[in-house]
């Protein structure tokens, strides 16, 4: 009897660790599990994971990211850094004679291992079939350019068939390239996506997006928003701070055909672009944190993190891209890598699927700079949150919240801790000053209707 119970307990525990299949929520704004539980996307960019890491390194990396609260890993099968000709750690390249119609199954056995290992930890792989330089190199990338109209769908069908039964796969078409005008790029990417969907048994069996380059005009929605295979929109907001990234999220959020949206590649920790980070040795955590909170408050269903050392799995025997600061193993514990879970926990500690952005709750006239205060609230009026990037005082409206009084919490994005403030009455406007001010002193004000019994922000049952 005791042995039977033990076996059932172990078996049940192992099942609970596996990733549940994801789908778009009924309101079209979020992702949920097959049991309709809210899913907050908290991803890491590990583009070179399949290409440059051994299985032992994969195990270490995934365990570390799991412990830090990540639940999605973004990785590429035909990798950017000479991924077709430079073999993986086991001496294998992904294509025979660089032909997409003849993939090398032995190479993909290592990809299988990574996907299965992630699944055993309850984690998802946002799987890019190829980096964009395999379609066209643009001004950088080693290519070679191997995809065209005749083979793109065939490769999509092959890889879609291989992973059609993996419930922890999220498909990401593209790879840091925007389709060129007067080219077949859009059609070629469509062919690949359609091939994957066909092999997997139709659109209902896939969850798919497109990874673009930065663009002031938006992300994947520019070319693919109306495509049946595209389930949610993705942006790359770039590697410079003080860009009003919330405007890109807001633009897609307001499209008439409703689809979820998020930033799939923001400013990287340890990235030297636009800063003298390499000389000063700082990791830009406060700038990254601001961008992440802005994006989610603007309506994104989650957020991707990235580290410049980690995405390329930098080691001393490899040529570094754009001056990495440290070995990738050392970079796993940088400040923001340990702070991203506080963003996820904050939003999952309040009703998630009824959340809407609401900038009208901030009454002051604002500039698009690092001081921009942004608001989000429950559609049903049970709570509101305000993100103060630099702790500046603002006048706020609480007219759309339920009740006549509100519990006040100040949530620290650096630590995930919170403390109570003085309760507020419902007035026409309220003036609020965060506990501290200045760059790096960002705070989230959380207001809960007194009608609702809520746990402290960031605490999940």
Image (spheres, rainbow, N blue to C red):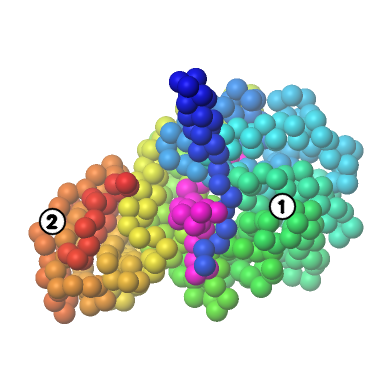
Say which residue appears at 51% left-offset and 54% top-offset: 35
Residue located farthest toward the front when viewing the structure as drawn = 1
**Residue 63 vertical position relative to residue 409 in the rendered view, above or below:** above
Residue 89 seen in render: yes
Residue 461 - label: none
Tell me residue 160's x, y (percent): 76, 49
Kindly check if marks 2 and 1 are in contact, taking CB atoms under 8 A apart as contact.
no
Tell me residue 121's x, y (percent): 53, 35
Residue 133 seen in render: no
Residue 40 is a magenta residue:
yes
Front position in the image: 135 or 40: 40
- Sort mark 1 into few (<14), some (14-19) or many (20+) by Cα contacts within 10 Å: many
Tell me residue 212's x, y (percent): 63, 58
- In the image, taking residue 9 as reference, residue 364 lies left or right, namely left
Residue 92 position by quadrant: top right
Say which residue appears at 58% left-offset and 76% top-offset: 257
- Sort mark 2 into few (<14), some (14-19) or many (20+) by Cα contacts within 10 Å: some
Front position in the image: 112 or 437: 112
Residue 259 position by quadrant: bottom right
Question: Which numbered disc, 2 or 1, marks the residue closer to the eye?
Answer: 2
Say which residue appears at 28% left-offset and 71% top-offset: 381
Residue 132 - label: 1
Mark earlier in primary sequence (2, 1): 1
Q: Give the range drawn in magenta.
A: 27-48
Q: Is mark 2 on a helix, strand or loop?
A: loop
**Residue 2 vertical position relative to residue 95 in the rendered view, above or below:** above
Say which residue appears at 32% left-offset and 47% top-offset: 460
Front position in the image: 99 or 85: 99
Residue 421 - label: 2
Front position in the image: 217 or 445: 445
Tell me residue 311's x, y (percent): 57, 39
Residue 105 is a magenta residue:
no
């Amino acid at each position: 009897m005791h042995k039977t119970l033990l076996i059932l307990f172990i078996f049940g525990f192992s099942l609970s660790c596996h990733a549940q299949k994801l789908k778009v929520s009924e309101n079209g704004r979020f992702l949920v599990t097959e049991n309709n539980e809210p899913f907050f996307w908290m991803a890491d960019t590990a583009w070179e994971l399949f290409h440059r890491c051994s299985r032992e390194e994969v195990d270490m990396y995934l365990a570390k990211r799991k412990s830090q609260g990540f639940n999605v890993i973004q990785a590429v099968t035909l990798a950017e850094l000479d991924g077709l000709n430079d073999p993986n750690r086991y001496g294998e390249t992904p294509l025979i004679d660089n032909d997409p119609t003849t993939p090398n199954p032995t190479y993909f056995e290592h990809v299988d291992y990574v996907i299965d290992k992630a699944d055993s930890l309850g984690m998802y792989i946002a799987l890019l079939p190829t980096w964009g330089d395999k379609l066209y190199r643009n001004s950088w990338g080693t290519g070679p350019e191997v995809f065209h109209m005749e083979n793109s769908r065939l490769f999509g069908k092959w890889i879609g068939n291989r992973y059609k039964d993996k419930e922890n796969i999220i498909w990401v078409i593209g790879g840091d390239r925007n389709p060129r005008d007067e080219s077949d790029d859009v059609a070629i990417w469509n062919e690949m996506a359609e091939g994957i969907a066909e092999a997997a048994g139709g659109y209902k069996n896939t969850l798919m997006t497109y990874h673009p380059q930065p663009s002031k005009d938006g992300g994947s929605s520019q070319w693919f928003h109306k495509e049946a295979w595209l389930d949610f929109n993705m942006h790359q907001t770039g590697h410079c701070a003080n860009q009003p990234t919330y405007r890109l999220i807001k633009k897609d959020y307001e499209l008439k055909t409703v689809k979820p949206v998020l930033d799939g590649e923001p400013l990287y920790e340890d990235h030297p672009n636009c800063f003298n980070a390499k000389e000063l040795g700082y990791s830009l955590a406060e700038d990254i944190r601001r961008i992440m909170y802005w994006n989610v408050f603007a309506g994104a269903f989650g957020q991707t993190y990235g580290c410049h050392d980690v995405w390329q799995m930098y080691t001393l025997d490899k040529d570094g891209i754009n001056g990495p600061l440290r070995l990738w193993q050392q970079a796993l514990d940088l400040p923001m890598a340990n702070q991203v879970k506080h963003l996820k926990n904050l939003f999952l500690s309040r009703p998630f699927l009824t959340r809407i952005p609401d900038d009208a709750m901030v009454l002051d006239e604002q500039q698009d700079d690092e001081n921009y205060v942004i608001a989000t609230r429950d559609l049903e009026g049970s709570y509101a949150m305000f993100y103060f990037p630099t702790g500046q005082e603002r006048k706020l409206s609480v007219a759309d919240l339920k009740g006549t009084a509100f519990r006040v919490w100040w949530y620290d994005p650096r630590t995930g801790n919170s403390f109570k403030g003085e309760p507020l009455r419902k007035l026409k406007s309220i003036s609020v000053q965060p506990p501290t001010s200045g760059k790096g002193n960002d705070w989230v004000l959380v207001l809960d209707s007194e009608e609702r019994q809520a746990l402290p922000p960031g605490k999940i049952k």
